[in-house]
Image (cartoon, helix red, strand yellow):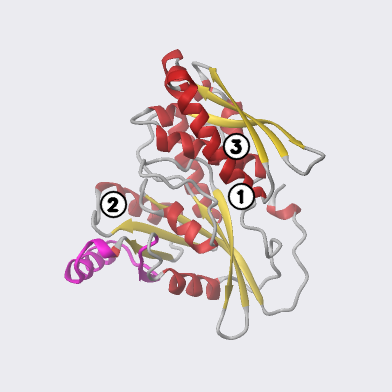
Amino acid sequence: MTDDDRAPESGDAKTRAGFVALIGEPNAGKSTLLNRMVGAKVSIVTHKVQTTRARIRGVAMADLPDGERAQIVFIDTPGLFQPRRKLDQAMVSAAWTGASEADKVVLLIEAHRGVTAGVDRILAELKEKTSGRNIVLAINKVDRIKREKLLALTAEISAKFEFEEVYYISAERGDGVDELKQWLGRQMPASPLLYPEDDLSDLPARMLAAEITREKLTLRLHQELPYQLTVETENWKDQKDGSARIEQVIYVARDGHKGIVLGKGGETIKAVGAEARVEISELLDRPAHLFLTVIVRPNWLEENERFREMGLEPPGKG
């Protein structure tokens, strides 16, 4: 279902609604900020980079001081980096598409890392791809540096790019997040609500469930393996007792990877399944029965169908 297919909610004229894209380098804190804004977990958060693959949308409501209500649809884009593989190219393309489609764009940078070469690349691309549209800068993890350094960083990056606003936040602790949310709400165009008020994300439940399982795998596995696997929800059946039977496939590229995912005596995959089942049940607000299968597909990273299942457009496709 596209945005155009959705019937906007009827309601009074005192509502605003629009889209905000969160962009930045991998691990800048975009997913953490999205989850903080929405008030629930809709995007993978790990210490590893490049864990957000598709443009995951989270829907947040903001009560504005003048009595208006704003619905902000956040697009958590994949981190922007130098693409090498086909999957990387699709992820970076998705990020820039998300930015071009949004009413507002928030660039996140990490305070303690400052203006890196990657941030410089993003700034150059912003000038080219956003046609001079206003960009908001959110300096994240401000609790990690002293005030003098923060002010110097602000001056340095503002000299390189003219931002509409600058916010200092800690997405993890919540500092400054409400102020940013309020400002973004006021910038949304006057509009009926785009989604029902209790919607947290426009991702299908089956894709959110797959993302939860992938997160649990990412947290348990090390080094490059998390980027060599994907999870798809193959079958979903609503049972008579109200529970859901969910069958998922974990695709890996090599036989050796399958053994790692399974773990000794199946310990790893059992633990992943147990953790994912609890979180999926909480997401659905009903019991979930999760069944995981690991399949070796050496070329899955090149298969267009795998990209579509992740919500990405294969490179070279319109």
Indicate the quadrant where residue 240 lies.
Answer: top right
Identify the amino acid type marked 3. Answer: Gly
**Residue that numbered label 2 is attached to:** 120
Q: Where residue 44 appears, x then y in whole percent?
A: 48, 46
Is residue 240 toward the left or the right of residue 78 in the image?
A: right
Indicate the quadrant where residue 223 lies.
Answer: top left
Q: Secondary structure at mark 2?
A: helix
Q: Secondary structure at mark 1?
A: helix
Q: Where residue 280 appears, x then y in whole percent?
A: 60, 44
- The residue sitting at 25% across, 50% down in the picture is 116
Q: Where residue 278 appears, x then y in whole percent?
A: 57, 43
Q: Nearer the viewer, residue 263 or 29?
A: 263
Extent of the magenta region: 143-171
Q: Where residue 224 appears, x then y in whole percent?
A: 36, 28
Q: Looking at the picture, does residue 211 appear above or below residue 128?
A: above
Mark identifier at residue 318: 3
Characterize the local packing of mark 1: few (<14), some (14-19) or many (20 or more) Cα atoms within 10 angstroms. few
Q: Is residue 307 magenta?
A: no
On the question of residue 311 being in view, the answer is: no
Assess whether mark 3 and mark 1 are in contact (beta carbons under 8 angstroms). no
- The residue sitting at 53% across, 62% down in the picture is 39
Mark identifier at residue 228: none
Q: Looking at the picture, does residue 68 appear above or below residue 120?
A: below
Q: CA distance from mark 2 to mark 1?
A: 40 Å
